[in-house]
Amino acid sequence: MNEWIKVFAPATVANVGPGFDILGFAVGEPGDVIAARKSQTVGVSLANIHYARKGDVGRLPGGIRNTAVIAAMNVLRTLQQRGFVEKTAGVELALYKNMPLGSGLGSSGASAVAAAWAVNVLFGQPLAKHDPDIILACIQAEASSSGFHADNVAPAMLGGVVLIRSYEPLDIIPLDAPQEMVCVIVLPEYEVSTRKARAVLPEQVALKEVVIPHYANVAGVVAGILKKDLALFGRSIDDRIVEPARAHLIPGFYAVKEAALKSGALGCSISGAGPSVFAITDDLERGREIGQAMAQSFAEHGIAESHIYVSSVNREGVKRIE
Amino acid sequence: MNEWIKVFAPATVANVGPGFDILGFAVGEPGDVIAARKSQTVGVSLANIHYARKGDVGRLPGGIRNTAVIAAMNVLRTLQQRGFVEKTAGVELALYKNMPLGSGLGSSGASAVAAAWAVNVLFGQPLAKHDPDIILACIQAEASSSGFHADNVAPAMLGGVVLIRSYEPLDIIPLDAPQEMVCVIVLPEYEVSTRKARAVLPEQVALKEVVIPHYANVAGVVAGILKKDLALFGRSIDDRIVEPARAHLIPGFYAVKEAALKSGALGCSISGAGPSVFAITDDLERGREIGQAMAQSFAEHGIAESHIYVSSVNREGVKRIE
């Protein structure tokens, strides 16, 4: 009998303020889990999806339109092409969807990464995490649900903070995160569609007034991370392009941000496409206070329930847990 | 009798590829020199300008429109306001203009920085190099000749690679340059006006096709410098906005760039507003070969004479030499 293994992939904060489509980092919680085992049936099948949030039950496609299945199929094909696996190999998956859908926490990316890594582990782990083919397998899976971008799947796979310097060719640069970096995520019970969040972006941007200050902040984020200067990192979380366009999609966003900063957060912005809002600090206890203040502010804007996650950066990325 | 002192400020490569208006670094040579002494005449006077290039003689304004004089006056005023210097103090300057005008090497900025620092040294050096007032004194002087920007004066003052994260408020971030970083500068005998170079810039830029890949490269430059990864730094010198707009102002630019890359340069672009072209490598000897190849390419495009400068990054910035 083929045994099940389980793989965990973490939630990720994409964009990190001004780094739309090019920066992301992995957090300690939440995350998705994939169970996988070898199967007699050729190819990849998805046996089951367990939803943590009742409202999500039944919302994900079950077959080859599921990001986990696409990623798993891509990796299986790569393993076959490289001669590691027989053409007749089969994999059975079960997805434990711990993250709510449409959260802005890289939920579909985490499922894809967990599935891709699970297939690799099942067949003796011939691919390294930074193998371009395994990352591309996940990017292509992501593309089917939320556009071609790697700022969720790359940090979910590798852990830490990741810069995608180029997509063609793929150039992924791990950035070592400061030890004391703590991330607060507040996820309001409110849904923002990724497609809608992409549709509100401007097509053209003013060079002098917007683009230059914007990329100065991108530079500040990278410098703050690599110089281990969290204050610089925090004040560089100043997004002149995407945050202003998306803020109205999240009820009370600017008040929530103000609440975070007033509670001592070094920086705060939308996580991915939202509605999750993230804040940076250097202390877990202060992080919990910041999270409470942010959730309270959401409550004052009509969103009674929010999830608060406070954790250090996840430096390990995807991992086998059973 | 009041004795003359002499202060040297280095040439600088502003923009560093994609970092228009926000990144710059100082080089070993060339540079301008200011001689200064206390004077009985209240305020700042410019006794003399010595031009190294004959064609430049008489082209710089001599009075309070000279950037060196403006910077010196600004610093003198700051010293007076902070109580370090009497209201009746006077300074006499002489400018040794070693750099050609309109070179794209921060010539006016170097003169301003040398003058600002000379005044500070004359009165016992009460201001540190990173004092915002002394940097602002130079930015304002620069603004009179070539627009409000700090990516020449900040590295000329501080040395090394410098990020200007924000102009309001001024937020200057020194980035430690990799030890083995070597810069090749080829300055063709051809003039590009800074005003013209600014006029050709686009007002609006396409977000998806241009802005995002562009700031990904800005992030790559900063990451390459701080990770001491010159290959990453070099391939991130990929400017999607300013270089394409300015290339036609420099005869043969793309051929010169290709010659640099073919000779082993890790990256190559326009220095500041041009016509100087800079290239990055990790070895002085190879740097000289790259410089020859670039000058040769300029010659093939009708510019018979070029100056070649090959040096490590200047980490010290402005300094007293006599």
Image (cartoon, coloured by chain):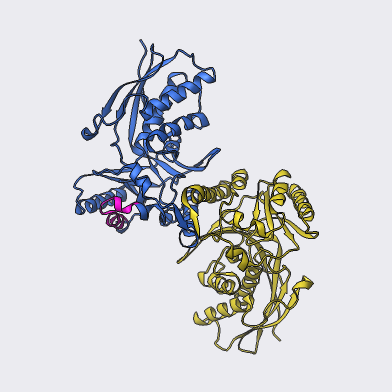
Chain colours: A blue, B yellow
Residue depicted at 50% across the width and 21% down the height: A79
- Which quadrant: the N terminus of chain A? top left
Q: Is residue B123 visible?
A: no
- Which quadrant: the C terminus of chain A? top left
Residue A254 is one of the magenta-drawn residues: yes
Q: Is residue B128 visible?
A: yes
Assign the magenta stretch its main secondary structure: helix
Q: Quadrant of residue A33?
A: top left
Q: Residue B261's x, y, as percent?
A: 69, 45
Q: Residue A156's x, y, as percent?
A: 41, 36
Above or below, B246 relative to B220: below
Q: Quadrant of residue B309?
A: bottom right
Above or below, A162 relative to A231: above
Above or below, B164 relative to A14: below
Viewer-nearest residue: B101 or B174: B101
Viewer-nearest residue: B259 or A125: B259
Residue sitting at the far right: B304
Q: Is residue A199 left or right of residue B268?
A: left
Q: Which span is picked out in magenta?
A: A246-260
Viewer-nearest residue: B46 or A49: A49
Q: Residue A279's x, y, as percent?
A: 34, 50
Q: Is residue B258 left or right of residue B305?
A: left
How many numbered discs?
0
Residue depicted at 75% across the width and 52% down the height: B294
Residue A321 is one of the magenta-drawn residues: no
Q: Residue B94's x, y, as percent?
A: 70, 79
Residue depicted at 38% across the width and 38% down the height: A146
